[in-house]
Image: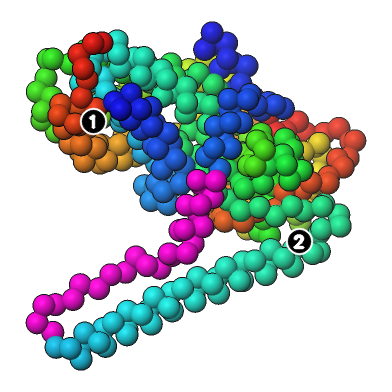
Amino acid sequence: MLLATMRYTSSTRAEITVAEKLLRDSYAPLQSGLNEMRRGINGLGLHFAEKKNMNAKIKQLNREKAQLTMENQRLQEYEAETLRLRKLLNFGEENKEQFGLEYARVIARSPNNWFKVITIDKGAEDGIAQGMPVISPDGLVGRISNTSQHSAQVTLITDREMAVGVILQDSRETRGIIEGTGDSYSLAMINIPYYAKVKKGEKVITSGLSEFYPKGIQIGTIQSVKRESNGLLLSATVKPAVQFDKLEEVMVIAKYNPVSESGINEGE
Amino acid sequence: MRYFLLAILPFLAIFLQSTFFNSYSIKGAVPDIVLVFVIFYALLNGGRKGAYYGLCCGLLEDLFIGRFIGINAIAKAITAYVIGILQGRVFEENVIVGIIGVILGSIINAGLLLVLVLLNFSAFNVNELLFMDMLYQTLYNALVAAPIYIWFYQSSRRGLLKGTGEI
């Protein structure tokens, strides 16, 4: 029975079971709470080991220094967050009309190393649905794989099951498929025709030829290119534009009308 | 109290794995604390009971992840059964036994997961990075095993996890 369930749930499902919804919704406030707490106390990692025989003045100065250091770290954290949010806001304002962006915070990540997923603090109640693309100002993050009432799971493009149809930004002609390798810092671009001129440093963007992702979202940059053993195709290593390990806020594209052109099969 | 604690441990472990330990991953690998608990339970209570506990804990993890439901349940149940064979044959009071059990269990569990995922989804991208992840996770599991085993063993013998002998 478990083997059958495993097979049935191996691909992305439109609907998750009541047990899964209950479990996720019970975890979501805890994860969200811990996430907020982590933000709040970020920078409190430094503790000063005070020597026993120091005089009162040095102690006082150390305390002041500690306070200022912690304040400084907190301010730096605020500054970094402000910059991030401003970037997000600017990007969002520019694309809100077109995509109906829904902002969300990352509250948890995959509890194991096999699947590259994140959990966000927006769910079905906020209009999030399975299949919606997820982006950040830096580029494509992934796709909503399932939702509960108050949270949703995003399968990252680095996941070993993910595939995205792409083109090279400069040439516009060279098509390929980006595959997740399970590594947050590297993607594989495959199925590139042998005659294609692919240069290191070229930007890779979504092709838009699928029902899942809009065209032109940045994926990353070409790091290296090699010829496949069959000699007919090339493959390339791509450095992702998004820093997946540091991802804290994302945007879900709630309104995307895919083009009807048939092309590259992707997402499965 | 014992059963309540045994039920709450995997919940807590999944919560920590998906939040806290993700901030302290080693080369992208997070420890499988659920597996560590399952292995310790099997080491101290035997293969059959360990397999049941592994099945329940794995299923909980599967429901949380929402993909390949059953994969962790099967892998953890078999791993626990195999590790449980060691019960009574090793010096359980020695923390090294716990660490070696976790290393062995992590290798068995990773191998089973790989076989099960390939049997069910041939397009799963298996590369050398996956094996590196397995290695780092095994090392991370071993690293967290020592303090957990000390608590788990003490608790199983004299504390809240002590069995009443009815099972």
Q: Position of residue B12 (x, y in %)?
A: 40, 38
Q: Position of residue A121 (x, y in %)?
A: 62, 48
Crowding at mark 1 (Cα within 10 Å: few <14, some 14-19, many 20+): some
Region in magenta? A29-54
Q: Amino acid at mark 2?
A: Gly
Q: Residue furthest right?
A: A260
Depth check, front residue: A262 or B71: B71
Whether residue B75 sits left or right of residue B48 in the image: it is: right
Q: Residue furthest bottom?
A: A57
Q: Nearer the viewer, mark 1 or mark 2?
A: 1
Contact? badges 1 and 2 (CB < 8 Å): no
- Residue B5, located in which quarter of the rendered image? top left
- Residue B93, located in which quarter of the rendered image? top left
What secondary structure is marked by label 2? helix
- Residue B43, located in which quarter of the rendered image? top left
Whether residue A217 sits left or right of residue A53 in the image: it is: right
Q: Position of residue B46 (x, y in %)?
A: 23, 14
Residue A40, magenta (yes or no): yes
Res. B122 mark: none
The residue singled out by tag 1 in the image is B160
Q: Amino acid at mark 1?
A: Leu
Between the C-alphas of marks 1 and 2, the distance is: 52 Å
Crowding at mark 2 (Cα within 10 Å: few <14, some 14-19, many 20+): many
The residue singled out by tag 2 in the image is A92
Residue drawn at x 56%, y 55% as measured from the top left: A247
Residue A91, magenta (yes or no): no
Residues tagged by mark 1 and mark 2 found on one chain of the structure: no
Whether residue B106 sits left or right of residue A159 in the image: it is: left
Q: Position of residue B128 (x, y in %)?
A: 43, 34
